[in-house]
Amino acid sequence: MKKYLIIIFSLYSLKSNSGLLLEPYAGLDNGSQDVSWFGLEIGGRIGWVWDIFMVGADIDAKNVNVEYEDFNYDEDTKISNRGVFAGWMWEDWALRLKYYFDSDWRLDNRQNFSGDGFGLDGAYRISKHFSINLELTRIILDNDLEAYDVLFSVSLPFDLVTR
């Protein structure tokens, strides 16, 4: 069965504009709600592009000082998110919907939180290999904390598309 799916996707790829997407990004991240922070985020996307449709995986990491409002204290926290995305690309624009199936929060005091969430990401491609992005994310952590964040980033999209 797996062999047949690979053949079908390969044949479709030969007939249309399709290819591999590699997109590293970095930007400023601002979070709020039950927790708040401001800091630098780095990440990347890897996926597949068919004509105007794209799917793939997204991973990011940030090391920020988080204010936990319910607990009245600040803590240096390492946050990493792993998820999947599906989206659409037009000539200069892209729109991606994301599902983060694993959000891992590691505090300096050795306490850990985890959760999942959703995101919406819009991008404007300034040149073939340079985009500016705006992403809105909502993460629900296992201790019922909610985190909303806004990421403004730049990315280097390399879509190795067959024409």
Image (cartoon, rainbow, N blue to C red):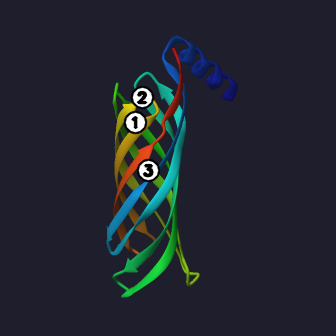
Report x, y in % for residue 158.
52, 32
How many neighbours does mark 1 have within 10 angstroms: few (below 14), some (14-19), or many (20 or more)? some
**158 or 7, nearer to the observer:** 158
Depicted 77 relative to depicted 47: above or below: below
Residues tagged 1 and 3 counted as in contact (Cβ below 8 A): no
Which residue is disc 2 drawn over? Answer: 53
Residue 66 rendering spot, x and y as whole percentages = 42, 76
What's the distance in space between the residues labelled 2 and 1, CA to CA?
6 Å
Label 3 amino acid? Tyr
Residue ranking furthest to the bottom = 72
Q: Which residue is mark 1?
A: 87
Q: Which mark is residue 99?
A: 3
**Left of 91 or right of it: where is 42?**
right
Whichever of labels 3 and 2 marks the residue nearer the N terminus, that label is 2
The span from disc 3 to disc 2 (Cα, nearest Å) is 17 Å
User: Under tag 2, what secondary structure?
Assistant: strand
Residue 160, quarter of the rendered image: top right
Side (left or right) of 109 relative to 31 = right
As drawn, 95 above or below 110: above
Could you tell me if the residues under marks 2 and 1 are in contact, i.e. CB atoms within 8 Å? yes
Residue 137 in view: yes
Relative height, residue 91 to residue 125 (above, below): above
Residue at the spot x=51%, y=51% of the render?
Answer: 43
Farthest right residue in view: 3
